[in-house]
Image (cartoon, rainbow, N blue to C red):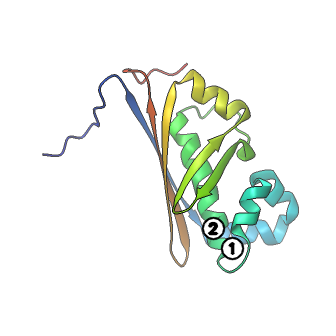
Amino acid sequence: MIHPEVQVPGHHVRVGCDVVSLEEIAYSVSTFGARFLTKIYTDDELAACAGPGRLSRLAARFAAKEAAIKAFSRPDAPFVPREIEVVTTKPLVTLRLSGSAAELATAQRWRQISLSLTHAECHAAAVVVAVCATTTPELP
């Protein structure tokens, strides 16, 4: 039987999902160039995206940052995109949080983060699942 709510004893699960058009990322890169890239991505992310398929990888990482922001459930918080970094440890990808994103994750008692990325010819998507060491979904 499938239950509509995930139950993890003593924990609360947060989920964020985002879909990004590759065309939108291509537009931002062609219009704003390095200014866009260095505002959104870390040096390590840019290195990981180099080569064929660059646009798809950039879009997937952008979607991951947006999905993480949605998992925080704090639309009023001023997030810095570079503080939400997609890290590749083959064959897995995960998130590394720093700065204000890491502080908020600590305040919300995030204990584990799972990330899934995918892309097709015209879109990229990401899902972030954060397991929090609290039984209530209340936000700090």
Asked where in the image residue 104 lies, by quadrant, the reply is top right
Considering the numbered disc 2 on the image, is that residue within a helix, a strand or a loop?
Answer: helix
Q: Are marks 1 and 2 in contact (CB under 8 Å)?
A: yes
Q: Residue drawn 59% across and 47% down? A: 95
Q: Residue drawn 41% across and 21% down? A: 134
Q: Is residue 109 above or below residue 13?
A: above
Q: Which residue is mark 2?
A: 57
Answer with left or right where residue 78 lies relative to residue 134: right
* Residue type marked 2: Arg
User: Which is nearer the eye, 89 or 17?
Assistant: 89
Q: Quadrant of the N terminus?
A: top left
Could you tell me residue 38's position as x and y percent?
83, 55
Q: Is residue 103 above or below residue 59?
A: above
On the question of residue 10 being in view, the answer is yes
Q: Residue drawn 63% across and 64% down? A: 59
Could you tell me residue 76's position as x and y percent?
64, 31
Q: Is residue 95 above or below residue 122?
A: above
Q: Which residue is mark 1?
A: 54
User: Which is nearer the eye, 134 or 55?
Assistant: 134
**Neighbour tally class for label 2: few under 14, some 14-19, many 20 plus, Cα within 10 Å:** many
Considering the numbered disc 1 on the image, is that residue within a helix, a strand or a loop?
Answer: helix
* Residue type marked 1: Arg
